[in-house]
Amino acid sequence: MTTLMSGNEAIARGAWEAGVLFAAGYPGTPSTEVLEGIARYDEVDAHWSTNEKVAFDECVGAALGGVRSLVTMKHVGLNVAADPFMVFPYAGTNAGFVVLVADDPGMYSSQNEQDSRYFAKMAKVPLLEPADAAEARAMIGLAFDLSERYRTPVMFRTTTRLAHTRSPVELGQRSEAPRTAFTRDVRQYAIPVFARLRRPELEAKLDELRAFAEQFDGNRIEEGDPGLGIVTHGIPYQYVKEVAPRATVFRLGMLYPLPEERLREFCARFDTVYVVEESEGFIQQEMASFGILNVTGKERFTNIGELSADLVASGLEGAPVPGDFSDEVAILPRPPVLCPGCAHRGVFTALRQLGALVTGDIGCYTLGCLPPYNAIHTTFCMGASIGNATGFRRAGEEQVVAVIGDSTFLHGGLPSLASAVYNQVATTMVLLDNGTTGMTGHQEHPGTGHTLKGAPAPAVDYEQLIGALGVRHVQVVDPWDLEATKSAIEAGLAHPGPAVIIARRHCQLLPVEKAKQHVPYRVIEEECVLCEECMEAGCPALVWEGDYPTVREWECVGCSLCAQLCPAEAIVA
Ligand SMILES: Cc1ncc(C[n+]2csc(CCOP(=O)(O)OP(=O)(O)O)c2C)c(N)n1
């Protein structure tokens, strides 16, 4: 049967067909739907982990324990999982182990544009990358075979365009992979003690993988015009086929290690070979290290943002277009906004009024850095807010607040809070507990009370947890109550040690909240003094129409923040 599938759905399907029994991950666009997809299959035990490193470690255990295991994450997730990713190859796996990493060229939903191919090289693991959904389905099975054949973790890379684009996929049947028993052997698995023993073996394995790459049929040459040779991979392959359908194309499906000899022979046939690759010049640099130098790549095809058929065409024509996001910035003058009733709005309104220095974190609440709140001053990566706040305190800043979402706190915030407590730094943290991983589409986490498969689960008790870390000032507040939120943060800042304010209210897009009846607010025009204070809420349900602000009833969820901001009591329910 053939059906339309996104790259992510096809990977989930292919992994299921390949007999995967365990899958773990942490959400992150564009990778999220792989785990959500595979969780729909009863045969697969799949769960969300607290972060990518935890997911990776769990899959290492499962693969050593004898079952095919898949761990999923977005590119920055691999930074979090980099520690085991760099060490596990020294041991090698037992059952098949594949790490799915989704890169985001163009940063549609990411804080940076990072090319994960370098990670595969650094960890010395094989890297496969498909060019469409059908190939993704087939190639993930191959990744498991490769992993078992060479007893190595395998990295499977996709990009946003592949992950979210639908194309026809021929479905297959599931075949159960035999379970392989774990052999207790510290010389293989207790790496810190035996790393020196294993180090040369890693190189020997890489040599075997190099030999495999030479005969792998996913690295294939499509003959065409003898005057135009192109080396490409993944999604850029589709652009090449569109704009240069008659070119002779060396399509790489295995990006590390590269088939050096076949590339050398291929390039010897042309005066110049074009390397059309997205993001950095990884293939080009590898080829240069082989001494293959009649190559034009990043000189013509930008490393900034996504490639496109147009960019590839102009590069091939010798009129390269530099990577540049300014057009997009120019047509997007309206910043993204928090949803009506979003619990984060009250916190940011309070923080703006208090004027504290705020270190932010990653989630919907990152929008707090934008007008009208202007209430976050730094944001880098998941879990950074508390450590950054501690550093600011150490640098002498008096009023510092770290804001962090519930999912992010469990992901990477806990160790930094423990450090602040341990070192008795008076860092104030606001935990934005909206009961979900909002930004990536409402995934469950250890604080929500449910698993990925929808089963009930114990929910973290934040008050107890934070108290047990040694925080002596913990206060829960409803962020829909502006004055209470403000005083809670003020009290936290006044506390001489680390303080935590838990701003607790569900994300209003959760089904349980959407099902509720809301009493919308309205503006009494005769009472309105046109001070525009209410607009400082930055609520999309409140618009300026004609001479007065107006509440769009169908959008208002009755949070009352605009009414609390109105000095004339002109907004009422
Ligand atoms: C290392 C890493 N993993 C995953 C992501 C993707 N991601 C962005 S925000 C976020 C979590 C947001 O949830 P939460 O902290 O609860 O805040 P909310 O969006 O609900 O306000 C995730 C998983 C990321 N940016 N970085």
Image: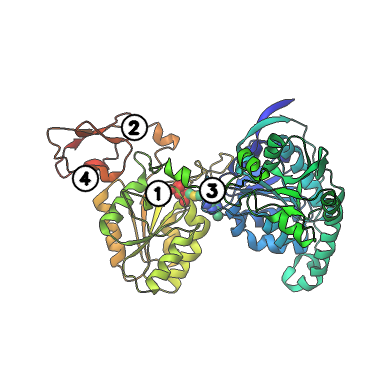
Residue closer to the observer: 356 or 517:
356
Q: Amino acid at mark 4?
A: Glu
Crowd band around label 2 with a 10 angstrom C-alpha radius: few (<14), some (14–19), many (20+): some
Residue at the farthest left position: 526
Q: Which mark is residue 345?
A: none
Q: Earlier in the sequence, mark 1 or mark 2?
A: 1
Q: Quadrant of the N terminus?
A: top right
Residue closer to the observer: 240 or 54:
240
Tags 3 and 1 touching, CB below 8 Å:
no
- Residue ID for mark 3: 107
Q: Amino acid at mark 2?
A: Glu
Q: Is residue 484 left or right of residue 526?
A: right
Crowd band around label 1 with a 10 angstrom C-alpha radius: few (<14), some (14–19), many (20+): many
Q: Quadrant of the C terminus?
A: top left
Q: Nearer the viewer, mark 3 or mark 4?
A: 3
Tell me if residue 116 comes above or below residue 337 in the rendering. below
- Residue ID for mark 1: 367
Question: Is residue 120 in view from this perspective?
Answer: yes
Q: Nearer the viewer, mark 3 or mark 2?
A: 3
How far is disc 1 from disc 4 in space, using C-alphas?
20 Å
